[in-house]
C-alpha cells in the first residue's frame, strides 16, 4: 500500500479519535482535499466550523481563514497545520494603512474583503466575499466606500457599481494578478469552444475576455450545472483539480499554464496528521478584536 494511502487512513482514524473536523480550501493539494470532511471557500468552511459539533477544527488553508473560523466558532479549538501558511494579500494591509485611509476619507464606509486579517476586519464596517461584493456595495447606504485590500476586486466592483465612489488600497492576490489577457487569448486559440470563467480577483483586462466572472464556489456550481464541456478557468490550479474530479466527462484548462499559490500548497497530508495528533498549531484571536471582527462579518450576513 502506498505511503500516502496509509497516512490517509491514519488521518481518518485520528480525526475520529479526537472528534476533529478537517476543513480544506479549494486550493489545497489533492491528498489533503481527499481526507477533508468539507472542501470549499474560506467563508463556507468557517460556517461549517461554526455549525459543527466537533471540538477541534483543523483548517487546511491559510491563517486568515483559521482566524475567521475562530471568530465564528469561539468556543472550539481551531488548528492551522502550518503556521507559515499566510496570505500575502492579507499581509499587504496593516492597521496603520487602514487608519490613514479612514483619516483621509472620514465619511467613507470601510468594506473589507474576507481575505484579510482579524485585526483589519475589526477596524472595518462590513466584510464582503468575492461572490457578494458587488451586491453588498450596491446595497449599503454609503456613497463613498473604502475597499480593502484587493484592488482588482475593488476595480471590478467599481465597474459594476458606477454610482458609488470606490477608494482602493493597492493590495492584490499575487496568483490572480499574474494572469494576463494574452494568456487567455492564447489558450482560447487552442480551445476555441471553451467557455472562459474567471475569478474577480483578476485584472480588468482579463475580466474583459470572460464569459462568466465568478467566485470559486460560483465557478464550481456553474461548471457542475453547465451543458458546456470545455472551460478555461482563470484561478488557482487546485480548483481545476476539484472540477475535474467532480466532472470527469468535461475538460478544464488553466490560463496558458497552471497558476499555483505556494502558500496554499505548503500544507501536506503529514502536516494535517501531525496537527491532529499533537493538536497544533492553535489559532487564537484576542477577545476584543474577535468581537469587533464578528460584528463586521455579521453585518455582511445581513445582506445575504
Image: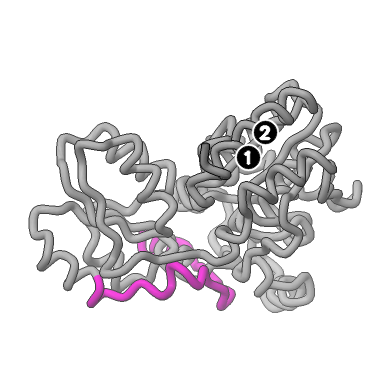
Disc number for residue 10: 2
Residue at the extreme right: 287
Q: Is residue 173 magenta?
A: yes
Categorize mark 1 by other alpha carbons within 10 Å: few (<14), some (14-19), many (20+): some
Q: Residue 40: percent from the left, percent from the top? A: 51, 40
User: Quick one: SS at disc 2?
Assistant: helix
Q: Residue 144: percent from the left, percent from the top? A: 56, 64
195 vs 124, nearest the viewer: 195
218 vs 281, nearest the viewer: 281
Task: Tell whether 23 sits left or right of 294.
Answer: left
Residue 118 in view here = yes
5 vs 298, nearest the viewer: 5
User: Quick one: SS at disc 1?
Assistant: helix
Q: Residue at x 17, y 72 (%)?
A: 186
Q: Residue at x 74, y 73 (%)?
A: 94
Task: Tell whether 292 sits left or right of 200.
Answer: right
Q: Is residue 179 magenta?
A: yes
Disc number for residue 7: 1
Magenta span of residues: 158-183
Task: Tell whether 285 sits left or right of 88.
Answer: right
Disc number for residue 93: none
Q: Residue at x 31, y 75 (%)?
A: 180
Q: Disc 2 to disc 1, how far (Cα)?
A: 5 Å
Query: Residue 205 falls in which quadrant of the image?
Result: bottom left
Task: Tell whether 177 sits left or right of 5.
Answer: left
Q: Are marks 2 and 1 in contact (CB under 8 Å)?
A: yes
Residue at the extreme front: 1
Categorize mark 2 by other alpha carbons within 10 Å: few (<14), some (14-19), many (20+): few
Residue 71 in view here = no
Amino acid at each position: 500500500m502506498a505511503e500516502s494511502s496509509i497516512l490517509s487512513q491514519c488521518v481518518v482514524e485520528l480525526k475520529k479519535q479526537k472528534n476533529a473536523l478537517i476543513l480544506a480550501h479549494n486550493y489545497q493539494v489533492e491528498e489533503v482535499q481527499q481526507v477533508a470532511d468539507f472542501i470549499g471557500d474560506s467563508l463556507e468552511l468557517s460556517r461549517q466550523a461554526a455549525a459543527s459539533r466537533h471540538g477541534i477544527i483543523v483548517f487546511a488553508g491559510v491563517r486568515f481563514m483559521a482566524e475567521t473560523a475562530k471568530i465564528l466558532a469561539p468556543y472550539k479549538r481551531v488548528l492551522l497545520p502550518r503556521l507559515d501558511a499566510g496570505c500575502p494579500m492579507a499581509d499587504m494591509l496593516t492597521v496603520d494603512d487602514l487608519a490613514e485611509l479612514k483619516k483621509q476619507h472620514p465619511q467613507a464606509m470601510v468594506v473589507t474583503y474576507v481575505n484579510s486579517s482579524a485585526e483589519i476586519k475589526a477596524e472595518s464596517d462590513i466584510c464582503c466575499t468575492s461572490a457578494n461584493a458587488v451586491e453588498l456595495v450596491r446595497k449599503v447606504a454609503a456613497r463613498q466606500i473604502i475597499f480593502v485590500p484587493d484592488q482588482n476586486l475593488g476595480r471590478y466592483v467599481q465597474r459594476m457599481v458606477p454610482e458609488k465612489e470606490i477608494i482602493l488600497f493597492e493590495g492584490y492576490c499575487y496568483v490572480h494578478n499574474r494572469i494576463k489577457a494574452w494568456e487567455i487569448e492564447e489558450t482560447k486559440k487552442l480551445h476555441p469552444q471553451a467557455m472562459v470563467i474567471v475569478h474577480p480577483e483578476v485584472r480588468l483586462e482579463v475580466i474583459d475576455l470572460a464569459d462568466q466572472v465568478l467566485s470559486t464556489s460560483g465557478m464550481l456550481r456553474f461548471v457542475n450545472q453547465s451543458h458546456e464541456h470545455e472551460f478555461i478557468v482563470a484561478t488557482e490550479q487546485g480548483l481545476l483539480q476539484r472540477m475535474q474530479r467532480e466532472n470527469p466527462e468535461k475538460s478544464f484548462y488553466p490560463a496558458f499554464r497552471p497558476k499555483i499559490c505556494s502558500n496554499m500548497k505548503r500544507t501536506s497530508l503529514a502536516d494535517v496528521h501531525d496537527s491532529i495528533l499533537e493538536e497544533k498549531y492553535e489559532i487564537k484571536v484576542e477577545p476584543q478584536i474577535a468581537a469587533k471582527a464578528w460584528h463586521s462579518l455579521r453585518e455582511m450576513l445581513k445582506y445575504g
